[in-house]
């Protein structure tokens, strides 16, 4: 796990694909995007927690992990996002809207995960696992030992309790496939 590389992927996704820019222009764009999408602050704290717990020298963990827990609780109470550093989410994580997001600490997801407000990923005899480029729309609830394939969109308000393959759109209570996407 390389938290710095994953953070770079998160920032690249936040900034989009643009031509070469100076570091100052990248920083200003990053701050502007952070202002528009405060969930990026939760992503920063999440990646910091991964780095502090898994990659920094053990001697410094005594000092760095308490700081992570303070930042985690600040994000938890101000943005209402619970994204524990023990969850394994690959680079390119994007949180568009903050508020009411709860992620289980054993959650596993691939690259390019997109979360919106009110998303709950929880445990019920197992924890969900997502593939790459999964989009979870507002108020969706995913729980249990389910697998969501690559390039899947979970509709707003969906309740997912069973596994779905990739390249599809699922919605409803309980969730079912409403459209099959053609792979690119």
Image (tube, grey):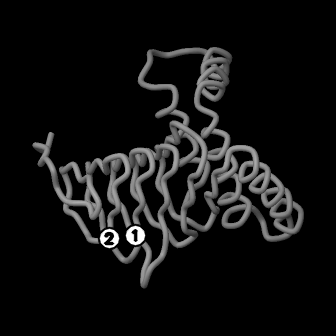
The outermost residue toward the front is 173
At 26% from the left edge and 51% from the top edge, which residue is drawn?
152
Q: Which residue is mark 1?
A: 128
The numbered mark, 1 or 2, whose residue comes first in the sequence reads 1
Using the rendered view, name the quadrant where residue 41 is placed: top right
- Percent coordinates x, y for residue 62 in the rendering: 87, 68
Does the CB distance between marks 1 and 2 fall below 8 Å? no
Position of residue 175 in the picture relative to residue 33 (left or right): left
Q: Between residue 88 and residue 129, name the one nearer to us.
A: 129
Q: The C terminus is located in which quarter?
A: top left
Count neighbours of disc 1 (C-alpha within 10 A) and say few if under 14, some if 14 to 19, many if 20 or more. Answer: many
Q: Between residue 172 and residue 25, name the one nearer to us.
A: 172
At 67% from the left edge and 24% from the top edge, which residue is drawn?
31
Count neighbours of disc 2 (C-alpha within 10 A) and say few if under 14, some if 14 to 19, many if 20 or more. Answer: some
Real-space Cα distance between discs 1 and 2? 9 Å
Q: Which residue is mark 2?
A: 161
């Amino acid at each position: 796990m390389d938290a710095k590389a994953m953070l770079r992927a998160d920032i690249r996704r936040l900034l989009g694909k643009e031509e070469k820019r100076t570091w100052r222009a990248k920083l200003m764009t990053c701050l502007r995007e952070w202002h528009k999408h405060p969930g990026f602050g939760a992503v920063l704290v999440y990646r910091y927690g991964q780095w502090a717990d898994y990659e920094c020298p053990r001697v410094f963990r005594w000092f760095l992990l308490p700081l992570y827990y303070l930042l985690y609780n600040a994000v938890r109470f101000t943005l209402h996002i619970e994204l524990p550093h023990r969850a394994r989410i690959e680079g390119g994580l994007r949180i568009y809207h903050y508020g009411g997001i709860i992620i289980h600490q054993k959650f596993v997801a691939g690259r390019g995960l997109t979360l919106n407000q009110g998303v709950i990923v929880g445990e019920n005899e197992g924890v969900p696992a997502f593939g790459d480029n999964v989009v979870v729309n507002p108020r969706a609830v995913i729980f249990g030992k389910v697998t969501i394939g690559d390039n899947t969109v979970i509709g707003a308000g969906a309740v997912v309790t069973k596994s779905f393959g990739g390249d599809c759109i699922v919605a409803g209570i309980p969730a079912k496939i409403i459209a099959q996407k053609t792979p690119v």
